[in-house]
Image: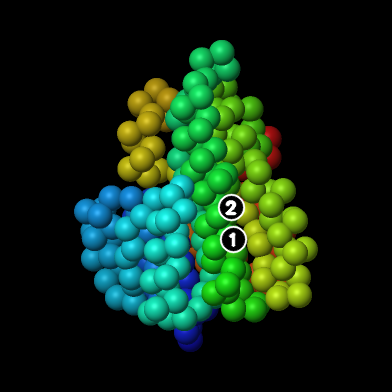
Amino acid sequence: MGKLDGKVAVITGGTAGMALAGAKLFVDEGAHVFVTGRRQDALDAAVRQIGRNVTGVQGDAADLDDLDRLYDTVKREKGSIDVLWASAGGGEPAPLGEITEAQFDTWFGLNARGTLFTVQKALPLFNDGGSILMTGSNASLGAFPGWSVYAGSKAVQQAWARVWLNELRDRRIRVNVLTPGQVATAKQEELFDEATKRQFESLIPRGRMGSPDEIASAALFLASDDSSYVNGMELVADGGTTAL
């Protein structure tokens, strides 16, 4: 038996990196997975990679109409949700003194506002006893220069998890935050040059970045009954970077 046999999971931003690895693993563990992405070509490619028991829904997690279309699709095809991984997010460096309104609005709009409404709009379809997890960032735990907007837009999730679990306690829906550190993904290749990557690696006690599969395994733990007694917590998977 798989750890998610018969479950329905929704993963936003599931076309690449950690979330795509998670979608593959969730399917391997028995779930039917709905994945979203803004670009149709990337979404189609992700669906092909996952291969089975997957539905792709094009959309932007920061667009509330797109979220409505996502959940209309889930309702029509499966009727309910057991697991929600609100993973869509992003950021860019912006040192204090140079931060623009557009940067603030973009990243708080996606990482904070988008995550909140991704969760809220899912609730009418959620089965009691389900699991919600949100992708945080160890930038919200460290003090990485230039990343205050990104860190702030992710830090709200820890507060939300604690409040929401209390609001959802009668439905036994768990809410947790999965906080990765530096992970070797295609997006990271776009953002960081070799010198920056080496600098980040020097901060990780084990000396290398994580892999998408390692984060996917942590997500499976939070999604499945293996974490049935874990609620309102932040699971940090950053190789020990922020422990030092």
Residue 80 or residue 136, whichever sits in front: 80
78 w.r.t. 158: above or below: below
The amino acid pointed to by label 2 is Leu
The crowding category of the residue bearing disc 1, from other C-alpha atoms within 10 Å (few below 14, some 14 to 19, many at least 20), is: few
* Residue 139 placement (x, y as % from top left): 58, 35
Q: Which residue sits at x=72%, y=68%? A: 168
The crowding category of the residue bearing disc 2, from other C-alpha atoms within 10 Å (few below 14, some 14 to 19, many at least 20), is: some
131 w.r.t. 40: above or below: below
216 w.r.t. 188: above or below: below
Residue 198 or residue 134, whichever sits in front: 134
The amino acid pointed to by label 1 is Gln
Instruction: Please state if 147 lies on the left or on the right of 12 as rendered.
Output: right
Cβ–Cβ under 8 Å for marks 2 and 1: yes
* Residue 131 placement (x, y as % from top left): 60, 69
Query: What secondary structure is found at the residue carrying circle 2?
Result: helix
Q: Which residue sits at x=63%, y=27%? A: 143
